Amino acid sequence: MAAHPPTERALNSGSAEQYVTMGEMNTKDAYAECVALARRHYENFPVASHLIPRRRRGAVAAIYAFARTADDFADEGDLAPAERLARLDAYAEKLEALERGEVPNDAIFIALADAVQRHRLPTEPFHHLLEAFRMDVTKTRYADFGELMAYCRYSANPVGRLLLHLFNAADERNLAHSDAVCSALQLINFLQDLGQDYDENQRIYIPQDELTRFHVGEAHFRERVSDFNMERLMDFQIQRARRLLQAGAPLGLRLTGRFGLEIRMIIMGGSRVLQRLHENRQNAFARPRLRPRDWAWVVWRAVKK
């Protein structure tokens, strides 16, 4: 991807946004800002882990920084939906500029432009992430599991696909297994954040037809009711997420080196969260946290494989 001379382009309701060549701004500092952003946010699953080789770690942080900040546009603060969508559209315009060889004067996009060029990353997954965040703004219920999985295709699967491209491992079989793992992890996140999603954003990420099937209603979420019906519903959700995670697990065995170990740790981390959810299913709205002994188990299982 060749960098074009600087141009100006109207973004964000007519404000001028300067585009620069990568040489005009310190790429190293841009990567450092992305790494710092990743470290400021807690996740149950490793981000830009030291298991990732140093020459790829900055690219992982840039991918994370893009996704994290765009996700915040959709979720954080008191912005009106129209403003949230406008900010996501502005990110899409910056991404389109990057595809033309123009580099937005923004640390995240400076790092991202370098990562895309250096590692030949596709840009379609970034667009898919933005589409998922738009859905977060406009959609709070999912009619059935197929509809929910369509959301996962945009919200979760792109990150796994980008990592496979980053490690030159994006063949058809690996991509399919990665999609299974990433979708499973997304479902696990939904299950551990039932109360938070409802309280903060009025979202329910369990299919509506399954709520009806198990006789669970909005009142369960509003009043945090963990009765027999909710327990049966959670059992069903946990078992399905586990099957999906196991379907993608061969990916961790097929990939070699530190990247393979990282993937196995992520899969084992998801498995451990599912175990905790199962143990706590009589209190469906209590978010499980992995403790040091849990991570010791994750590491042991990942290495043992």
Image: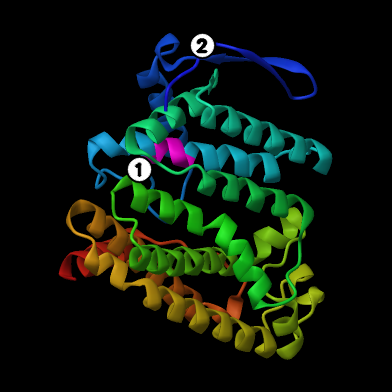
The answer, for residue 92, to whether it is visible in the render is yes
Closest to the observer, 88 or 265:
88
Residue 22 x %, y %: 43, 17
- The residue wearing badge 1 is 48
Q: Are marks 2 and 1 in contact (CB under 8 Å)?
A: no
At x 72%, y 38%, the residue is 77
Location of residue 213 (image quadrant): bottom right
Closest to the observer, 72 or 172:
172
Neighbor class of circle 1 (other Cα within 10 Å; few <14, some 14-19, many 20+) is: many
- The residue wearing badge 2 is 5
Compared to residue 173, the image places residue 155 above or below, namely above
Q: Secondary structure at mark 1?
A: loop
Compared to residue 209, the image places residue 80 above or below, namely above
Q: Secondary structure at mark 2?
A: loop
Foreground: disc 2 or disc 1: 2
Magenta segment boundaries in residue numbering: 60-64
Residue 248 x %, y %: 38, 72
Residue 237 x %, y %: 57, 80
In this rendering, would 171 be left or right of 275? left
